[in-house]
Image (spheres, rainbow, N blue to C red):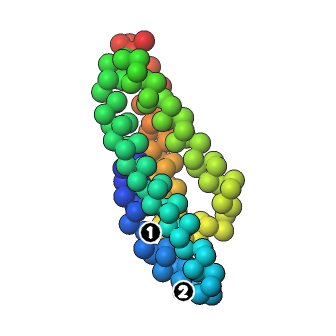
Amino acid sequence: MLIILGILHLAVTPFIARLISENVAETVAIWLTPPMLLNHVIVGILLLPLGILTFYAAPSAAAGERWALIVTRVIAITAATLPLVLSILMGAGYFGAIPFVVATIIVFIAALSLLAAAFWPNSSAA
């Protein structure tokens, strides 16, 4: 799901640029667009290896390997904070945008799934 979220993040990046350019003055768009696009691309790109790393570590975590348990648990806890932080920092107004709602739902499902998988009792886990 983190990989899907990264792909979604990158896919909506051009729409954000267009949204900015169509809804603000040109002088504001020139100032606002580059940092917004940079932020969106960085987050999208960083989500991809985070999802791949989680996928890679999952079988070893299920086998109880300590390094993999640490990796999956840190990623799970971090992902679990995202929906709460999004709600607090962004406010309800942003939840009118369909891509934002979809991304938030994916993050929420991923967070719950990651937490369950990372901390589920496992007899072989140390």
Please tell me which residue lies in front, 79 or 26. Answer: 26
- Asked which secondary structure carries label 1, the reply is helix
Q: Amino acid at mark 1?
A: Thr
User: What residue sits 69% from the left and 53% below the top?
Assistant: 88
Q: Which mark is residue 13?
A: 1
User: What residue sits 68% from the left and 56% below the top?
Assistant: 89
Q: Earlier in the sequence, mark 1 or mark 2?
A: 1
The reply to whether residue 122 is in sight is: no
Please tell me which residue lies in front, 59 or 28. Answer: 28
User: What residue sits 49% from the left and 35% below the top?
Assistant: 76
Residues at badges 1 and 2 in contact (C-beta under 8 Å)? no
Q: Which mark is residue 66?
A: none
Left or right: residue 100 compared with residue 93: left
Q: Which mark is residue 22?
A: 2
**Quarter of the figure that contains the C terminus:** top left
Q: Amino acid at mark 2?
A: Glu
Q: CA distance from mark 1 to mark 2?
A: 14 Å
- How far across and how far down the image is residue 50, in percent? 41, 42
- How far across and how far down the image is residue 87, in percent? 65, 55
